[in-house]
Image (tube, rainbow, N blue to C red):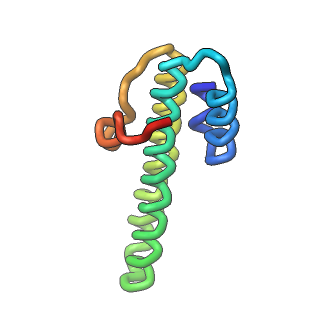
Amino acid sequence: MAIVAYITIIGWVISYYNYRNSPDKNPFVQYHLTQSLGVIIFSVVLSVASGILLGIIPSLATLFYIIGLAPLVLMLLGIITASNNAERPVPFIGKLVEGKFNL
């Protein structure tokens, strides 16, 4: 379930409901649910910010396209970490979301 949590918002919702309904709450899955939720929130904020800035400065489209790949990279790093059975934070935003969400 920790790996599925990183696969889009639908995977996160599936993992969350499976975690919530399980009799034994695995702290490993909870950690990766929190990390993936941080990646999802970062992706939405980045998308909104780049949309606004592209409306103002359209010549920076290529730069924002490259920056827009950051959530994909963070998601892949989270999947790799979860598949290695490790609890390492996702780079850049992982430390910010640790302990912030009560899942």
Residue at 65% of width from left, 18% of height from top?
A: 23
Image-based side of 103 in relation to 99, left or right: right
Residue at 56% of width from left, 20% of height from top?
A: 25
Residue at 52% of width from left, 45% of height from top?
A: 72
**In what quadrant of the picture does the N terminus appear?**
top right
Residue 37 in picture, x, y percent from top left: 49, 43
Residue at the limit of the structure toward the bottom, as seen here: 56
Residue 82 sits above or below residue 48 on the image: above
Residue at 48% of width from left, 31% of height from top?
A: 78
Residue 82 sits above or below residue 14 on the image: above
Residue 33 in picture, x, y percent from top left: 52, 34
Residue 14 figure quarter: top right
Image-based side of 13 in relation to 97, left or right: right
Residue 43 sits above or below residue 91 on the image: below
Image-based side of 64 in relation to 10, left or right: left
Residue 40 in picture, x, y percent from top left: 51, 49
Q: How many marks?
A: 0
Residue at the limit of the structure toward the front, as seen here: 23
Residue 3 in picture, x, y percent from top left: 60, 27
